[in-house]
Every structure is written in C-alpha cells, then in structure tokens.
Image: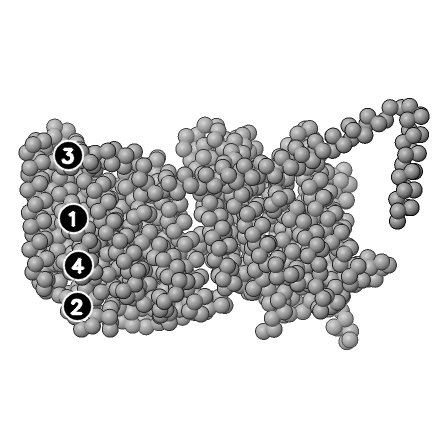
Amino acid sequence: MSPTAKDTTMHYSGLVLGAIFIPVLGAFCLPLAAKVSKRLRNILSFIFIASSFILCLELIPLVLSGQTVSISKQFALGLNFSLLADSLAVFMACVSSLISAIIALYSFGYISHYENQNEYYCMVTLFLGAMIGLIFSANLILLYIFWEITAITSWRLIGFFRDKPYVLKADKAFLVTVFGSLLMLIGFLNIYQQTGSFDLPVIKESLKFSAVSNLTVALILAGIFSKSATLPFQTWLPDAGVAPSPVTALLHAAVLVKIGVYVFARIFIVNITPDVLWHTIVPLIAGLSAIVSAGAALIETDLKRIIAYSTISQIGFIFFGLALGNEVALLGALLFILMHGLAKAGLFLCAGIVEQNAKVKDITKLGGLISTMPITAISFLFCSFSIMGIPPFGGFFSKYLVFSGALAEGRLWIILIYLVCAFMTIIYLFRVFNLVFLGKANIPAREASPMMVKSVATLAILSLVAGILIYYPYQFAQKASWQMLEVIR
Amino acid sequence: MMVQALLLILIIPLISGVIMFFIPKKERRAQEGLLIIASLANFILAVSLFPQNFTYRLPWLDSGIELSFRLYNFSSFMLLSTAFFGFLIALYSVIFMRGRNFLNQFYGYFLLCIFFSNAVFLSDNLLVLFFFWEGLLLSLFGMIAVGNKEAFKTATKAFIIIGVTDLCMMLGIALTGHLSGTMTLSKINLPLNNPLASITFILLMIGAISKGGAMPFHSWIPDAATDAPLPFMSFVPGAMEKLLGIYFLTRISLDLFQLNAQSGLSTLLMSIGGITIILAVMMALIQKDYKRLLSYHAISQVGYMILGVGTALPAGIVGGLFHMINNALYKSGLFLTAGSVEKQAGTTDLGKLGGLGRVMPVTFGCFLITALAISGVWPFNGFFSKELVYDAAIERGMIFYLAAVVGSFFTAASFLKLGHAAFLGKLSSQNEKTKEAAGAMLIPMIVIAAACVIFGLFNQLPLKYLIQPILGDRLEGHNFSGFPVNITLVVITFVVLFLALANHLFGAKIKGSGLAALDHIRYAPALSKIYDLAEKRLFDPYHWGLGLVNIISKLSLGIDRGINWLSDGLSVRLAYGLSSGIRKAHTGNYSVYLSWSIAGMLIIFVILIIL
C-alpha cells in the first residue's frame, strides 16, 4: 500500500471514528461546559452533533465511488470492535445527524424554561453518537451495545418531566424495547453458534451456503419491531408522547424508530438472507401495523399521540419496501427514511410549538391557530403534504417507488392494504390540520421564538426541496441499494 | 426557437405565479398587471406553438423517468384551450376579485394552475405527467381555501376526494410501467386482454374521471360553488378540469390501451357517463342558487363526454371531445354570468333575483346564448356535439341513448327555470339600482358566447382542424362536421326540447313563478322522498367513504388498545400475581423456610435420578 493510500484510509477511518466519538465523548463534557455558561453548553451540543453530520457528509464522495471504509480490532469471544461505512450506513448517518442538528437548534428555544437541561443536552448528544455508532457497527455485539445506549438515553429523555405518570411511560418504553432487544440478543447468539462470529462480513461469508433458522429470524425481528414500534410492540410510541417535543421528534419520529428499520436492512438484506416465507410475513405484519395505527390516528384527540401513530403507520411502509427486497422498492424505502424523517420531525416540532404556546394538546379544544402562528401552520401543512405523498414534495417519490417496487413483485393484495393506509394518511393529517389551525380560534397563542419557528420552517422547506431536487438523494439511495443488493453497474 | 417557446410556456406561468406570492398586498395594480401579462403571454405562446409537432427530452431520474415533453396536435389543442380560458378569466377576475382578501395568493395559484396543466398536456412521461397532475391538486386546494371562511372545509373535501383517487391513479401508473416496461406515453400501447391490464385501466380511469368531476367523485364541486371565489369555478371545474380529465381519459382509451367497443370497460365507462348525466341533472333541477345549479351541470355535462369517449366509436370520441371544448366554453361563460350577477346584484339566491334581464341586458344575452348551447339547441355548439354522442350511444345500446336524451330534457328544463327566475319576471325591489357589469367583465363573456355561436354554425372549424386529427387512423375516414346525418335523432331532440319548454310553461303557470316551475317534479310522489334524503346529503359518496374509514378506525383502535392491555394490563397483573403468591410463602418462620429448602433438594434429586 502506498503511503498516500494509507493516509487516505487513515483519513476516512478518522472521519468515521470522529462521527461516532465526538458526540459520544462530547456528551459528557456538556455538564462541565454548563459550569462555564449555559450558552456554551448549548452551542457545544449543537457543534458536536453538527460536526458528526459534516464528517458523514465528507464520506459521501468515497462511498459514491463504490468504496467502503472498514475498521477492525480483534478482541476475545468475537467481541470485536469493527466498523463499516458503506453507502447504506453513510446515507442513514447523514439523514440522522442532519435531522438531529435541526432538532438541537429547536431545543435551544423549547427547553430553555425547564429544569435538568444539563441532562437533556447530554442525553441528546449521547443519543446521536450512539445512533451513529450503531449505524457504522459491523459487529452484532457492538451494534447491541449502541442499541442499548440509545434505549437508556431515550428512557431518560422520555421521563424528562419527572411527574409519576411520565416516568411510568418512560419505563414502559424502556421495558418494551429492552424486552425486544434481549430476544434479539438471543438471536445473535444463535447466529454466533452457527457461524462462530459476531462480525457481519464473516457471518455473511459463512452463511452463503446455509440458512439461518426461522426461530433466529423471528427473535431478531422481535427486537427490530420493538424498536421500530411495529405491531405488536407499537403502543410504547404513542405513550412516549409525554416527552418534550424535540425529544419526540428526535427519538420517535425521525431517528430512534429508524434504528429497527436500519438494522433490518443491515442484517436481513445485506448480510443474511432469511427464508422466502418472511417476504410475505414481514409485509403483512407491517401492513397490519400500518393500518391499525392509521385508524388509531383518526380517532385519537391528543396531537402528539396522533403524530406518533402516524409514525408507526409510515414505518410500515418502510418495512414493506425493505421486505420486498427488489431494487426499486429498496430505493423507495431508503428515500422514505429520509423524507419521512424530515417531514415527521417537522410535524412533531410544530406540535411542540402548538403545545407550548397554547398549553393544550387536545386537538378538539384547539382551533384557528393559522391566524396567530402562520409560519407554523404552513410548515405543518408542507410536512403533511410530504407525508401524504403529494408531489412536488419529497414524500411522493418514496411512496411511489415503494408501490412501484411492490407491483414489480406482483403483490396486489398486500398493496391494497397499503393503499387504504395511504388514503387514511391523507384523511387523518387533514383532520389534525383543520382542527388545530382552522376554524374558530379558541385559545389565543402566539408564534414561538424565532429559532424554533425557523427550524420548523427549515424542515418544511427541506421536505419541498428534497422533492424538487430529488435527483441528488435519488442517486445516493440508488447507489446504496445497488451496493446492498450487490448489483454491479 | 420552438424549444424556447415550449420551455417559456412552462416557465412564464411558473415564475410569474411564484413571484405573485411575494407581491405585497397593497400593490394591487402590480398583481393585476402581472396576472394579465402572464396569462396573455401564455396565450400568445400557445398560439405560436399551435400546429407543431416535436419532442423535447431532459434526463431526470433513472429507471425510465425523464422530463420529456411532446407537442402534437392533441396537446397543442389543449394548451390553446387552457390558455384561451386562462386569459379571459384572468381578465374577468381582475375586476371581480377587487376588494377581496388574499388576492396575491389567488392569482398565484391561478397562474400555477395554468403552469401545471400546461405541463400535464405536454408531458410524454407518465410519472412526470402525474407529478404535475398532483401539483394541480395543491393549487386547487389553495384556490378554494382563499374563498370564504367555510372554504377550508370544502378545500379539504376536494383534496381528500381527489387525493384518494390520485393515489389510485399513481398505482395505475406504476402498473402501466410494470406492464409495458416503459413510462413514455407515446411508446405505450397495451391490449386490454388480461385482468391486470383491466385493473390498470380502471385505476387510471378513476384518476381521469375524478379530475373531470364525474360521479361518484363529484361531491366537492357543489360545495365549492358556494365557498370558492367564482373565477375559480369558471376556470377550474368549469373548463380546465374537464379538459384535463377528458384529455387523460382519451389518452388512456385511445393511446395507452386499446379500448374497443366490445370490451366491458367500454360499457363501464358508458354506464358511469349515463348515471352521472341523470343523477347530477336531477340534483341541478332542484337547486335554488344560481352557482350551485350550474355546479351540478358541471358534473352532469362531463357525463356526456365520458359516455362519448366510452363508446369507443369514432363518432362518440369525436363527440365527446367536441363536447368537452363546447362545455368548457358555455360552462365557463355561464359561471361568468353568475359572477356578474353576484357582483352586481349582491346575491346568487334565485329567490331574491328576478327581472335582471332589463338592467343587465348584455349579461342576459350572454346567458341566453350559453344556456341555449348547453341545452343543445340548434344552431349552437352544444347541439352538434350532443348529436354525435347520441349517435354513438344509440349504436351501443338504447339505454345509454335514453340516459343522454332524458338528461337533455332536464338540462333544458333547469335552464328555463334558471333564466326565468333570474332574468325574467319582476325586478325585485332590492335590485332596482343594479347596473350592468364593468366592461372588463363583459368582454370575456361576449367572446365566449360568440365562440359558442361560431363553433355551432361553423362546426367544421373545430371538428376538422382541432378534433378529428387527434383520432388519426381511428377516425376510419369519417367526417363528422356539418349537419348531423341521423335526422331521426335530430327530430327526437327537437321534440324533447319542445317538451321541456312545455313542461316549464305548465309548471310556471300552476305555481305562478319561474323558480317554482319544476316543483311538480321535485315533489312528485316517488321522487320527493329521494330528494329529501339527497338534500340531507345521504347520497354523498364522500360521507360513505368517511363512514367506512371510521369503522376501520374504530376497529383499529380496538386492536391497538387490546395490544396495549397486554403490555400495560396483563403483564403487570401477571407480575403482581406471581410476586404476591410467592410473598405468601415468606412467613418469617424458620422451620417453614427449612422445609422449603428440603423440598427443593428432593426435587433436584428426583430430577437427577430420572435423568
């Protein structure tokens, strides 16, 4: 290896390590920084998250050229420290850190009048670091460790307000997801038994000619579904709506719930080929989950619970796309992660503004807010359009590609479930919009602080821009899907 | 040069529409100026592009999605028509909308509407077409929403209905791509010989007829008539949506799929057409508001077009397309007369109007011409297109012809009622000071009324040069211009129209007023109950749909709560139950603990021995 080549490898490894450990280690400096000034702490928190985003961005040219970065350090019992940055990982990391950075900006305004801010910033930053770590993990145990770190941080963040009912909801979220992840751990151990390694590339090699048992697949899926709040583990997500809004946006809409989706893609598409049976079971479970939660979203009256149900419903679409496994559907699912993340984070942040200024979350008691908070209202509408899948918003392309991929597989009956879901999406989002922003103004509420409004508007505009400039995310996601399916072009 | 013109016709409405949103409210002149200039430029460009043929491609995304635009006789005809109505109605809006709020938004959406529809007509890629097609939904939503305070509800209703049908269309488009392997419109030509192709056709058709406003996707239109600004009604449901819907319907049945007269899909289309004609016109009969009455006709008339295209016979398709352009003319003209009445008399409630013919002679004249045209009276344009549709319908089945003719009877009857109630009779006291509308509002009406006459008297003009070339080989050498060939049908038409007049005179005589002239139908023994239910909106498919969704939702919430109980209720209770059971064993008594331990040891021994 020539020195320059070695240098570049070092450089890229440094990027990956930096993207993970700047926020992970930085998180613990934040309480110290707060001793100096609160402002410094806030800005540092943003810088840590944003630098993670920038480092991930720098990886894009490399992965687009078809190369990958891998770091490996061997330890006993297969507990290796091995990382891998391929297109899929970099795509996911960029999306997560971008959305997290915007949410961090929003937090400056939102969280400023509550207690325990040190803990908040520490946990948010640590969460993002763990998320990025999970994304780049190429070892199942490493992945599991990061997975549980996100569980712990989200437990603290959901219970941010210390009232008893809130803490109980946080406990529930923790218990359900950890229950799932323990099952998943058993699944990982099964794989270890079979292949003698936790490293994904090794597992892939040794499973080329043998299959994993359905039990193993089911165990791992239980973990994935519990984290991504899919039937039958979905109920913790709406309950977690008691958290502060930036937290719900960060954890439960844009980033945390995508962990399950990502791990599904990482394990079951890239590395292990499960039995054909799962190509039917996963879409069915996801479809059921999508329709049940869409229905619940139509009846619920709590603003954040509705949006949470909507998340569950949209996650179903992502699983659908991934489980179909063909190129178009995969591409659609990846774009879905991006578009849904942007739009849903926007919706939650809008809900946060409404909640904070109107002091009410019950949509039947709200109304007419468009006259007093026009930017929030329009942003909400934009994000809703994206989620409904209306062009020129970004959500259209992802939804279309998932459907188109499903048609290529000839799954007309399953498509029907999702079509009904897409109908209901339009209806429940409009119901929310009409009840909250239109009609008679019951509660006087003014627009939130400029920083909050700006971050909401940024997400709304990004949803639109992502649709108009679909070319760029499309190219990236396409590369990722080719790499995942090992299509040589 | 042509490429520039093609790009300009897209860019000018887009850019000027976007700029419009940023013009401050106070700069009314600037807004009006921009609207007029942009729509005029659009019209001039459409004229300059008119008779040409070419394709322009821009690569966009992989997997066959490219921004490709194709100009040929059909699309240039549609561009021209949209631009024509766009300009006239823009001119009209400038006066009509004065003094209202959100002008910049309304005009902005108006121009965006023109942009999106231009793009739809030019697209040669299905997905690109759909992209712009759905864009229209946004501008439609915006235009309704800036109406009165209740308008948002109607806008939502329209959005949900069209959004849902557009999703069906999206699925249809994906299926088309899957079946044919390409997304390029001009390369697709699929036979309708398997169930999947038929499903695809139906899905695309749902999108097309819902845009056209046919039943059962119609119910937002009458609501919009009350809530949305009038130029919207005249432009969008009156003209543009019919053009779009029928354009796409014709494309799918002529080009994308080989729809023939033997297929069940053709019968399905004709049935939808026939039912739409009859039911909507029956509702139009009983309306007591100028705009609402017209809006039901906007639904009913699209039935003729769907019936015509659905026959899959040359006469029917030509008739349907001719009817499309004719309807766009007289329907937008009629809405414009409603607008001048609204602006000048302050109301469109027929009960409060009357005798306006004397004070608003020009408006009355335009109304007269357009109303005669929609009723299908010779020599106006509606007569010729309806005769073509009749001709094709009777060849496919007596029942379809009957639906069309009965529809004509009621159409004529309801316009006799409308004209009588609004323009004839005694001038009510509150309207004594009403004056004729301003010139800029009259010109568009006069131009449109004149076009109705010209398209009737010189019907070879539109038929030979605009419509018949679209069919190409499908025309089989026919020429449909001139006076209808089938004299029997013409005679029947005249008889029907005469009966409608007689019916009106009879009704007006017994009730003593023009408005009540159709009450003997409204309160006829069998119909009166049905009408009562219809007025309670029991027949609104939108409400049925929402009801169904509601049931699904309740069921879903039940499942969700049930699963929630598993985690929140059952598991907690199990844990409590177990621990409280074990707690009872902890008595604090040493001998009890000892006996537990010995029992445990014994069990282990037993297990070891068995193993």
CA separation, marks 2 and 1? 29 Å
Q: Earlier in the sequence, mark 2 or mark 3?
A: 2
For marks 3 and 4, the one nearer the N-term is 4
Q: Which mark is residue B464?
A: 2
> In this figure, which residue is indicated by the disc labeled 4?
B394
Amino acid type, callout 4: Ile
The disc labelled 3 sits on which kind of residue? Asp
Q: Residue at x 92, y 38 (%)?
A: B601
Please report contact status of discs 3 and 4: CB closer than 8 Å, yes or no. Answer: no
Could you give the CA–CA distance between mark 2 and mark 3, rounded to whole angstroms? 43 Å
Q: What is the secondary structure assignment of the residue under circle 2? A: helix
Residue, disc 3: B519
In which quarter of the view is residue B202 placed? bottom left
Secondary structure state at the residue bearing disc 3: helix
Say what amino acid the circle numbered 1 marks.
Val
B204 in relation to B2, above or below: above
Disc 4 is attached to a residue of which chain? B
Q: Which structural element holds mark 1?
A: helix
Q: Are marks 4 and 1 in contact (CB under 8 Å)?
A: no
Q: Earlier in the sequence, mark 2 or mark 4?
A: 4
Residue A16 seen in render: no
